[in-house]
Amino acid sequence: MEARGAAKQPTVHRTAPTAKTYPAPHVVDAEVGKPRVKPFLSKRRIQHEPRVGGGKEVDGLLETWTWQMVAALKSQQAQPVNVGMADWMTLAYHQYTVAVRNARLVGQEIAALLKWLEESVQFSPSNVHLIGYSLGAHVSGFAGSYMGRKHKIGRITGLDAAGPLFENASPNDRLSPDDANFVDAIHTFTQEHLGLSVGIKQPIAHYDFYPNGGSFQPGCDFLGLYKRIAMHGLNAITKAVKCAHERSVHLFIDSLLHAGMQSTAYQCRDMASFSQGLCLSCQEGRCNSLGYHARRGRQSRRSKSLFLVTRAQSPFKVYHYQFKMQFINQTEEPVKVNFAISLLGTKEEEQKLPITLNGGITSNKTYSFLITLDLDIGELIMIKFKWENYQVWANVWNVVQSFIPWGRGTFHGKEEPVYSGLALKSIRVKAGETQQRMTFCSENMNDPQLHPAQEKTFVRCEANSKKLKRKIR
């Protein structure tokens, strides 16, 4: 569909789900009581995708992802849809402030079209899903706002909604949860520069998803940006920004193409807390699927911020694990060490994942952190743990052990083993995707001590308040 500020006639592209070429648009006469394209209206839902610049490159050609999204939407056999696209390039290719002002006009035209469909053929706005990228996300919000409460749109998805002139704006002046029955947003490039970010950082939906924290995205090489600027000029900046900003689009397409590999996000305060593995709960709607299959759940006026880690390319899904390790350190100073762990599951094995505990290991303390895997290893059954930076600590540890021999001592009136140097008492694991909790203890229950350069095996065990017991499988 083509909705322009000055035009009153929407344009419809009619395509098959597997079409590789697309016919000339068909114009629906808005002055006629009954539209001529009834098959377009007989489907269950209209998907509408406003885009910055109409989804076109500078040369006027449609972005390659535009038709990828159309094909992905049309391929949903369980939920057939009609797909419309708003081309407002002539109103978007101005100075940014002018384009922002025009966005409200385009939203008003889209709302007028949807009301016309409702009046002409009783097509309910509750069956409409607007998908907007960058500035188009706010266009979708304006369309929903103009529809009003009596004609509320079913769903709006904002794909890295534009930040400049919208950050900290009132809900009436940007996409907000009030604009549809269900609003979800994906934030992929919210890194600030001079107080501005390309994508909006604040929550603007019922569910706000922040892949990889929402600032940068894996595979978008910002670290090598200056080198590429020297080689390719300022065009390198455009490519780097486009990569992260547009990642929101590809994450959404990925959710359509890989229905069996949905990425799960978890409600959390911020990415720092999420990286510690503190937020892998799915209780009371605290997790949700990223993209097309996001669940509405119980909604409130307060936005939920959800975080997840993704791969650098499609399929983007990773598997999240919370690890809690209970160390015992008998030395006076923090032990700064690097570890490597290997995970053996019922399906696959992941070897030598590097682990660094910032600040080192102090006296008896449990450390929590997040581990992500690209592969589905199945149910975790064994962990191999190795102290890596042994070259620095091997000699020191031999000296430490000469001063702190093995023995037994008392703790709260009870006799407990005294560990020489550093020991790992237990490893507790929670799998985010399955919500399964597991406890692992040393294969040799009487020897939890860690030695530089030596690998120690941990197996499933049952935990209670008094003692860890090996789990017989």
Image (cartoon, helix red, strand yellow):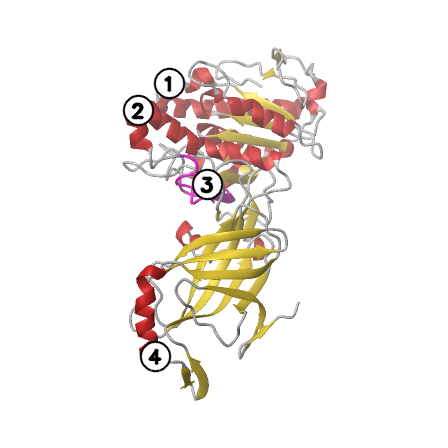
| Residue, far bottom | 413
| Numbered disc in front, either 2 or 3 | 2
Q: Position of residue 338 (x, y in %)?
A: 38, 58
Q: Nearer the viewer, residue 457 or 314?
A: 457
Residue, disc 4: 404
- Horizontally, residue 209 falls left or right of residue 71, namely left
| Residue corresponding to mark 1 | 94
Query: Circle 4 sits in a helix, a strand or a loop, which is it?
Result: loop
Q: Nearer the viewer, residue 391 or 187?
A: 391
In the image, the segment drawn in magenta is 201-220
Identify the disc placed on residue 141.
Answer: none
Q: Which residue is nearer to you in this view: 129 or 465?
A: 465
Foreground disc of the pair 4, 1: 4
- Judging by the rendered image, the residue that carries numbered circle 2 is 231
Q: Rounded to the nearest whole Å, what is the CA distance between mark 4 and mark 3?
A: 57 Å
In the rendered structure, which amino acid carries the disc numbered 1?
Answer: His
Q: Residues within 10 Å of mark 1 (few under 14, many from 20)?
A: few
Which of disc 2 and disc 4 is earlier in sequence? 2
Quarter of the figure with residue 262: top right
* The C terminus: image quadrant: bottom right
Write down the residue under mark 3.
Answer: 204
Residue 331, visible in the rendered structure: no
Real-space Cα separation, disc 1 to disc 2, in angstroms: 29 Å
**In the rendered image of this protein, does residue 408 appear above or below residue 455?**
below
